[in-house]
Image (cartoon, rainbow, N blue to C red):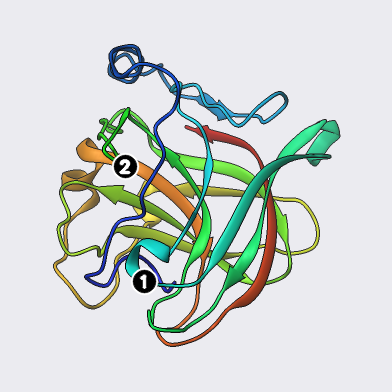
Amino acid sequence: MGLFLVGSCRPHIKATPKSSAASAKASAALPAPPVELSNFESDLGSALTTKWQAIDDKGAGGVSTAKAELVAGGPSGSKRCLQVTGTARVESFPFPFAGAALPLGPVVDGQPTPIDLSRYHGVSFWIKGDGKQYMLRFQSEAISDFNFHHYVFTAGPEWKQVRVPFSELSQFSWGTKVPWSAARGQVSAFFIVTYGKPGESVGNFAFQVDDVSFF
């Protein structure tokens, strides 16, 4: 992914209109699994009172772009889904990325506060797209070198459910290895973003997501 990862920056995330106190209370009392985080039938919100938003690499000096919006359609008769479109390309920043993010805790100064995912075993979602590879990535405050746990998948032209046990998340070969058992208690956000080799431009991209849940 040209991620925000390799020692550069974390994406700046916008605060939601909810108060920090209200968001903190909601995230502190996480529901038992399974829990539907977002179905996108009416808005970009989540069961954690946070909202999905577009992210890109501009905070690291990149030029990639992303747009996140509700559109008609979805799997199994769903009326609406999240659509993410944009361009991920190399210029001055060699690790381009763009996509969508869900902050899991209240956003303070552009960074979401962490929550404890220990009671959950994995994440599932429906996806379709342009046939390119994408990365599901979990940002944990237990990791300081941006080598966050991730899972790479292909978004094909037909709706497909992706079900990822947290035990199947991995880290890159560079950086410090932190077991998921140590990282899961301080997860502040997760992302679905473009995936490519360092220095590689992914180009234009498009994917749709629906029915995101923790199990």
Measuring from the top left, give residue 9's x and y in whole percent.
Answer: 27, 62
- State the residue in front, 175 or 59: 59
- Where does the image place residue 70, in percent across and percent down from the top left? 72, 38
Pinpoint residue 72: horizontal percent, then vertical percent.
Answer: 83, 38
Q: Could you tell me how far apart the alpha carbons at marks 2 and 1 are, in whole angstroms?
A: 16 Å
Query: Where residue 106 appears, x then y in whole percent?
Result: 32, 27
The image quarter in which residue 103 lies: top left
Q: Is residue 7 left or right of residue 10?
A: left
- Residue beneath label 2, please? 110
- SS for callout 2: loop
Q: Is residue 90 above or below residue 75?
A: below
User: How many numbered marks are there?
Assistant: 2
For label 1, the residue is 61
- The answer to whether 135 is drawn above or below residue 13 in the figure is below
The residue located at (25%, 41%) in the rendering is: 184
Question: Which is nearer the eye, 181 or 129?
Answer: 129
Q: Quadrant of residue 212?
A: top right
Q: Residues within 10 Å of mark 1 (few under 14, many from 20)?
A: some
Return the disc, 2 or 1, that comes first in the chain's sequence: 1
Question: Which amino acid is tagged 2?
Answer: Gly
Depicted 36 relative to depicted 191: above or below? above
- Which residue is at a point 17% across and 72% down the rendered structure image? 175
Q: On residue 107, which mark appears?
A: none
Tell me the kind of residue under disc 1. Gly
Residue with the most extreme bottom position:
199
